Amino acid sequence: MRLKSILALLLMLFVLPISTLQAEVYPSTYNPLPSNPTLITHATILTGTGERLDDASLLIADGKIAFVGQGDVPEGITTIDAKGRWITPGLIDVHSHLGVYASPGVKAHSDGNEMTNPTTPNVWAEHSVWPQDPGFSRALAGGVTTLQTLPGSGNLIGGRGVTLKNVYSNSYQGMKFPGAPHGLKMACGENPKRVYGERKQLPSTRMGNMAAYRSQWILAQRYIDDWEAYEKKVSDGKDDAKAPKRDLKMETLAAVLKGEILVHMHCYRADEMMTILDMADEFGYKITAFHHGVEAYKIADELAEKNVCAALWADWWGFKMEAYDGIQENIAIVDRPEGSCAIVHSDSAEGIQRLNQEAAKAMTRGNLAGMNIPPEHAIGWITSNAAKALGIENSTGSLEKGKMADVVIWDVNPFSVYAKADQVFIDGALVYDRNNPDLQPVSDFELGQLQGVSK
Amino acid sequence: MKTLKTVFIASLAIFTMAAQAQTIMIQGATVHTMGKDGTLENTDVFISGGKIQKIGKDLPVPQDIYVFNAEGKPLTPGFFAGITSLGIEEVSAVAESVDGSLALKEMHPEFNIIPAYNPHSSLIPVTRIEGFSFTLLGAGTKGSIFGGQGRLVALNGGYESFIGSSVLFINVGRDASELSGGSRAGQWMLLHQAMQEADNPPASNEARLLTRNGRNTLSAYAENGMKTVFNVDRASDILEVLRFAESYGLSPVISGGAEAWMVAKQLAIAKVPVLLNSLSNLPGNFDSLGSRLDNAAILEAAGVTITFSGAGSHNARKQRQMAGNAVSYGLPHEAGIAALTSNPAQIFGFTDDQGMIRRNKPANVVLWSGDPLEVTSVAERVIINGELIPMESRQTKLRDRYLPENPDMPRAYIKP
């Protein structure tokens, strides 16, 4: 790095507010598991960047993708002949509650919704994550290498989400995706107004929802102003500089306004999403992704234009009023405009195991509706687009040289109900093998259950 | 009391023919008859007057009828949507649109869901255009151990399209423990007491669990061997169901059955069928620690008749994906189709109406774009009771309203 750029960087750091200069708290302790260089040959590769490569090779070295494509490959390393099999990037679920609503789903494991106040940006989902959730192992068998665990939707502002590598560890810190930004879970519509309306408190209406979010953003702007005023006094050498009191709620919201935390907004109805987009403009922040968006197809153009992702189900609908207009073409229609960012998400310990099947259903409905969506495009809904929404697209979500070797080998075309993940690699380490029980992790909870039952 | 029962049974025998049966020829299909004829390649099926009139090669085509060239695609019986609240529930979180459960704590096995059935519910077209021709309307789990009674219904949208006899629902295990003083042993205590009351009505001054109608209902199920669905997951609870049912002459069906594979042999010997969710593989609670993806395959191999349930009402169409996943985990493909067609028809005793493709029987068939259990296949034509179902639902109308790009006028003017 040249001196000039180092100086520029130092200058940039200097003017950044103090809050962002604090060392990362609850830092990731994740380390890739041991791996060997691995060459996979003769596979059909869906790169996640829209390409399909037939009879192609993938080389994993030092935990990274070292080569993808056809042509000469190095000799003398572990080779997997994947003839007839398919390779995709590791799947990414942007909306999971694994760890915070762990199996078994007993009350003692209900740690996802801090429904004691409609705005709880101070809570962090990671502080609820139980790393022994058996659901992580099932998701792994479904090819999921990265997931975002979010708080629930009972609150308007539910708290921070955490992005995890899908590896077992004694702590969530050991799963925490290095360098991934936090998400902020927010929720529109029926859930918050029902939860708090039943208690005869704000919000009991959609307009109440809006009033409550806006009040919080105003407080957060003030919080930033107070800190900036303090920092200016410090830099001006004023003696009366007195640091404002730290406020966990405001720290999260201020980080959103500064673009450091990505907003993941549970929102079903098209009109509400439009209102939320205006609110983001009012306070100068960005919605990274709407989640659930059962009516996103009604505003596909607006979402693409605003560069907002929509994380959706293939076919869920009708369980509440705001989900009544669900259609199976939702994902495909959202995907249609230039610059769109459609994502298939699960919100379910069952669905996360079959993101490929959910994407296959959405692809099928889009094609029947006259769109031309091949698997090499649809795979982006559960890989590269999801990575983009989590702010980790530079390190994972596609099979490109230099990216983390998060890779799945499928026995057949993954866009099939019969497809199974044969092998799953995370950062180049083989962490799941369907044909090798030694490489199938079992959570502490499941160990030793059902003694005497012959399986 | 005897007369009452006879009336009750007679009323179960309603058989409804489609109002607008058509004359239809499906040519050149791969016909999964699900009967003794097996699967017939390149075969024609001729439907008229609501029934399948002919099955054969190169059948003559009368004039002015609907003709579909299947080009070898699969034709199966209409699929079973599982236990649902189709026509009983419109929006789950809108209480006034939900009638599936009697929230009274007293025992009312006489509660019957059928008067709440609305054949015009938007869920019915949403479900049937995906290849589903019948469902079992379930009765509630919010009240007592007795959910009440439901019944099978054909999804042609008729007011009287019910099939077969009523079915009783009983909830035991984890879910019901609050309904019985907090112990599942209390459930069995109360269930035994209820059956004994039905058999031997208590004196007028004695404490009782059931109304007169409730007693009559239970004795009808016991005397006539009518199907009783037990919602239960844990292996030891399933065995308790078998003992209980045998001692009162009930004809049990297991629903849920997460650990049914552990007692597959006992279920096979007792000829007790299982309705299961083949996607369940998590220890979701302490009753289902043994959940596994090959539950269906193990049960089928042991000789247990299985079908699928558990996708709920709105997404009942997911049953097909359930069957596909069961096949992916060891269930033979044809058994996967049987689990959605002939098996449920056999379990509930109406193979004449649904679940098979047979001459002179009501025409309930679906023509598929490809493998009927594959997520990339769809139903292309659906015929219920001989009637060609319009491939339209509220969802297809919303789709067609929003598919056109940049319309001049608001989409409220686009009315597909």
Image: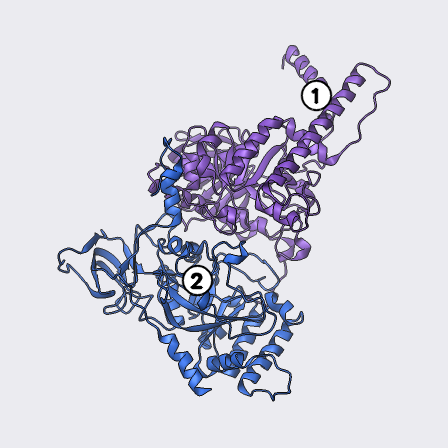
Q: Residues within 10 Å of mark 2 (few under 14, many from 20)?
A: many
**The residue marked by circle 2 belongs to what chain?**
B
Chain B: give its colour: blue
Q: Residue at x 58, y 77 (%)?
A: B191
Question: Is residue A174 visible in the rendered structure shown here?
Answer: yes
* Residue B281 x %, y %: 53, 57
A63 or B332, nearer to the observer: B332
Res B355 quadrant in image? bottom left
Q: Secondary structure at mark 2?
A: strand
Taking A284 as reference, is A339 left or right? left
Q: Specify the color scheme.
A: by chain
Query: Horizontally, is B139 left or right of B74 in the view?
Result: right
Q: Chain of mark 1?
A: A
Q: Nearer the viewer, residue A9 or B407?
A: B407
Which mark identifies residue A16?
A: 1
Amino acid type at circle 2 is: Gly
